[in-house]
Image (cartoon, helix red, strand yellow):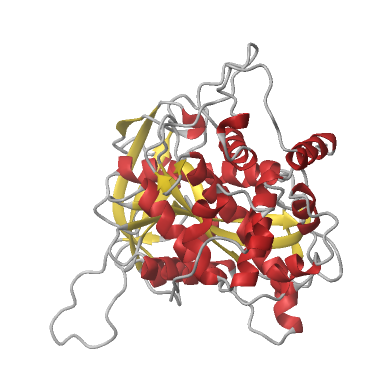
Amino acid sequence: MTRHRSAFPSPAAAAFVPPTLVPLMAAFRGFFTAPVWDHVLVLVAGAVLAPGKRTVSAALRIMGLGAAPGFARYHHVLSRARWDSRAVARKLLAMIIETFLPDGPVVIGIDDTIERRWGAKIAARGIYRDPVRSSHGHFVKASGLRWLSLMIMVPIAGIQRRWALPFLTVLAPSERWSTERGRRHKKLTDWARQAILQTRRWLPKRRIIVVADSSFAALDLIAAVRRHVCLVTRLRLDASLFEPAPPRRHRRPGRPPHKSRIPPKLDKLLTDPKTRWTTLVLPEWYGGVRRTLETVSGTAVWYHSGMPPAPIRWVLVRDPSGEREPQAFLSTDLALAPAEILGWFVQRWSMETTFQETREHLGVETQRQWSDLAIIRTTPALLGLFSLVTIWALVTIWADGLNRTAGPMRPRPAAWYAKTEPTFSDAIATARRRLWCPTDDLSISRHDRETIEIPTALWRRLSEALCYAA
């Protein structure tokens, strides 16, 4: 229920808000009251411009509000103000779809990440396996918050690989948090089910393919979402697969069968000389390289006692070069070809890049809120800012609004680094340049004058940002 409100900030806040930010953020104006909207514009600009930590204090300093007496009101945007983060996520999803995927299937990756946080006041934290520092033979535990994030895999002009743009991130509290509050603990797959079905309601007319790792290869999750989306995930090599049950005979007593005979397990097919392998050339495999693979595929029913049976298409993959171990994948759409299943699944590795770049360039894990509401809002906001910055880097700002026909981003090469494709560092640099330089006076493309005029207040902010950059 978006109400028509002016996107421009109040005269008092206009002195600190870059004018180029107003049309970029206009789509979210209806979700905030006028006083909160002024503070939101300042915080968003500060989060993009600030180097290092992404605290509210750092945002205020970079915006020239380090001496503002009403600084607590900016903290209240996250800890007290009334606004619906789910509605903001839905609008962000619509912006991503409109900009990058106006038609065709929508590939959505879902994965969890650990935000390493300590402190007795952070109630929802738990002890989890650290996916970044752990390996198959080395287990590392981390104290922090577990987030479940949904990202859209989108093509970007001039870039070979697809980018993963977050739009919905939810907190999955620890079991200790649920026990202390007398609530039923929700597993990660429970949160995934709710998030996937919520996305389905937001995109009722689009085909959705959800790609996930083995953590989400659960029969209860597959049973809940397979009629709404296509789920592609890993499959254990020793999974209990069965042939479909035969049609039930007329007037036969008893419960209808769920499965038929047991075929050879997938790990047995790897060593069976009778297995008929098909050679498949994927244009993009792990590491973004072209790879020749051998595959075998079929349909089966994945069944476990007490769980609903799940009809799936399985794909067994082995690398003739021997560089990678054999793997198995599943799809809830039985009509998909192995090339489609593998091509969609490999796109989910862009999510790892997104998690890494949000930590490096947007300061995830550096925020210091203790309020429960502020914690729930801040990390999803920073992940959503990754998507906004990507969109902003690809649009041209005109006096009357936005033009989405801008060319591709430019990489930042050097004599010692032949960078051929732009990354998120180039995207945020483009967004910062447009916020720092609302006019052409500071444009790096102007070479007709040796000196330029910079307002004193802007020069002080630039100098302080450089002096305290590290």
The answer to whether residue 109 is above or below residue 464 is below
Residue 146 visible in this rendered orientation of the protein? no
**Count of numbered marks:** 0
- Comparing 390 with 62, the one in front is 62
Residue 65 position, x and y percent, is 79, 55
**Residue 372 lies in quadrant:** bottom right
The answer to whether residue 193 is above or below residue 443 is below
- Comparing 328 with 205, the one in front is 205
Image quarter where the C terminus lies is top right
Residue 50 visible in this rendered orientation of the protein? yes
Residue 47 position, x and y percent, is 68, 51
Left-right relation of 361 to 166: right
- Comparing 192 with 2, the one in front is 2
Q: Residue extending furthest top?
A: 415
Q: Residue at x 64, y 53 (%)?
A: 17
- Comparing 142 with 273, the one in front is 142
Q: Which residue is drawn at 71% across and 66% down?
A: 375
Residue 7 position, x and y percent, is 52, 62
Image quarter where the N terminus lies is bottom left
Q: Residue extending furthest left?
A: 250
Q: Residue at x 86, y 56 (%)?
A: 67
Residue 460 position, x and y percent, is 80, 39
The answer to whether residue 308 is above or below residue 360 is below
The answer to whether residue 374 is above or below residue 390 is below
**Residue 305 lies in quadrant:** bottom left
Left-right relation of 13 to 369: left
